[in-house]
Image (cartoon, coloured by chain):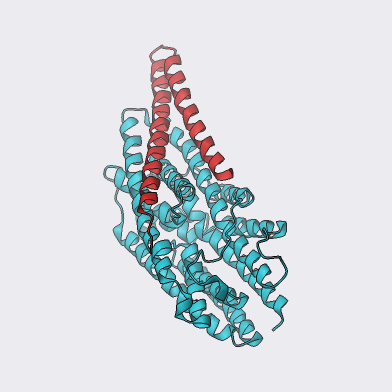
Chain colours: A cyan, B red
Amino acid sequence: MDFSLIVLVVIVAALAFDFTNGFHDTANAMATSIATGALKPRVAVAISAVLNLVGAFLSIEVAKTISGGIVDDTKVTPVVIFAGLVGAIVWNLVTWLVGLPSSSSHALFGGLIGATWIASGADAVHFAKVVEKVLIPAIASPVVAGVVAIVGTFLVYRITAKSRQDVVGKGFKTGQVLSASLVSLAHGTNDAQKTMGVITLALIAGGSLAPGSNPPVWVILASGAAIALGTYFGGWRIIQTMGKKLTEIQTPQGFAAETSSAAVILASSHLGFALSTTHVTSGGIIGSGLGRKLAEVRWGVAGKMVIAWALTLPAAAIVGAIAAAVSTRGSWGTVLVGGVGVLLALGIWLASRRNPVTPATVNNEPEGAEAAPVAA
Amino acid sequence: MAINWGALGIVFVVALAAAVVLTGLFAYGVRGLSERVTARAHGGSGTVQLTGAVVCFAICAAVIGYGIYLIVA
């Protein structure tokens, strides 16, 4: 097989994954601001997109290994990376179709685990690392962010309980814009570098770059642009779930949820215990629901999210494994997997058109429930 | 398998402290603004309340600035 061709295919797949990562995660930063009306939907995704792009250029620590030790990196060939990316993209699209947030990192890890397992055997997968880097953080993230958000929300309502509600509403709307922007920036520094790492390592594996090279500028630019474009495209289905279905959000709650999430994300990335952005922000929103008296958390929706989280890694692994089983048979296999992947993506997009969620309808109450007042 | 529970604990404590400081101060700032409006409605100047609010927001801005510095550096 022509080596440069597979590297090119990996780059395209990595950018496609980056794009799905962007629109999957817009909700993390912007769902509560859109739900409370602090920002108009289009403005919110535009701000988030710009800050993700800025974040991509700010991050200096690009992943040195694709999997962080979850699989044996010496066994990771470009074909395995490609198969892993296909698994991650397919899972991201499926969860987007049903409107559930799920971790793009977990999807990528899952895809790589499945692809490596098929290509090199189960021994190449380090299961202890999977528990350490995936399982424990997935449980810890929402709990930590949730508790922080409960305390933050309680404080905010306690302190402003006797204040003029018009001033409170306006003040926290401004606060929300700032806190949501901080989450977007933190997201850009975290997530764009995953793709940069994947592309850079594929270039190294293909012999285009010397081992240990930093990502070329065009890689940083392309990764930043792909995630920003995905963010601007807006995962409206997921934004609706996070902003409207999970709990009723008022501006002070949105502010507390985002501030808590930003604090947890930044603390985790600088104190050496990586937590997933998606799990943190979801926990933050649930926490802000629990922290306000009489706010109702819809546990049915939260339960579905937890199921999606639990399925993310194994589901992406299965798709990645199938993709690897076909791709490793030669060029025709890789082309077949690529073609089927594009058709699947197209099918999912067409399915989404039957029940579209747009910037205009994102704040509608689900299932015809009566629209509740959003302003505080 | 080495799970770094200590690091997780520190993340929790630091995040909690940062979030409490930020949300608390911002809320006091908003409360100050609200009290200023009330004071002015009753013929007062509201300067004290405004000063208090500005101080709260300024500390918030400093903490956020430090957060951005952490991202960049």
Instruction: Judge from the rendering whether residue A191 lies leftward or rightward of residue A279; answer left or right.
Output: right
For the point 67% across and 65% down, the residue is A211
Would you identify the image quadrant in which residue A336 lies? bottom right
Q: Is residue A166 visible?
A: no
Instruction: Judge from the rendering whether residue A87 lies leftward or rightward of residue A282; answer left or right.
Output: right
- Above or below A342: residue A363: above
Q: Quadrant of the N terminus of chain B?
A: bottom left
Instruction: Judge from the rendering whether residue B31 lies leftward or rightward of residue B68; answer left or right.
Output: left
The mark tally for this picture is: 0
- Taking depth in this image into account, of A269 and A364 the one nearest to the observer is A269
- Above or below A169: residue A46: below
For the point 58% across and 61% down, the residue is A64
Q: Position of residue A63 (x, y in %)?
A: 57, 59
- The residue lying furthest to the left in this view is A294
Q: Position of residue A177 (x, y in %)?
A: 51, 41
- Above or below A107: residue A115: below
- Taking depth in this image into account, of A361 and A201 the one nearest to the observer is A201
- Above or below A362: residue A166: above
For the point 45% across and 67% down, the residue is A95
Q: Position of residue A234 (x, y in %)?
A: 54, 57
Q: Quadrant of the C terminus of chain B?
A: top right
- Taking depth in this image into account, of A96 and B22 the one nearest to the observer is B22
Q: Is residue A264 visible?
A: yes
Q: Position of residue B25 (x, y in %)?
A: 41, 30
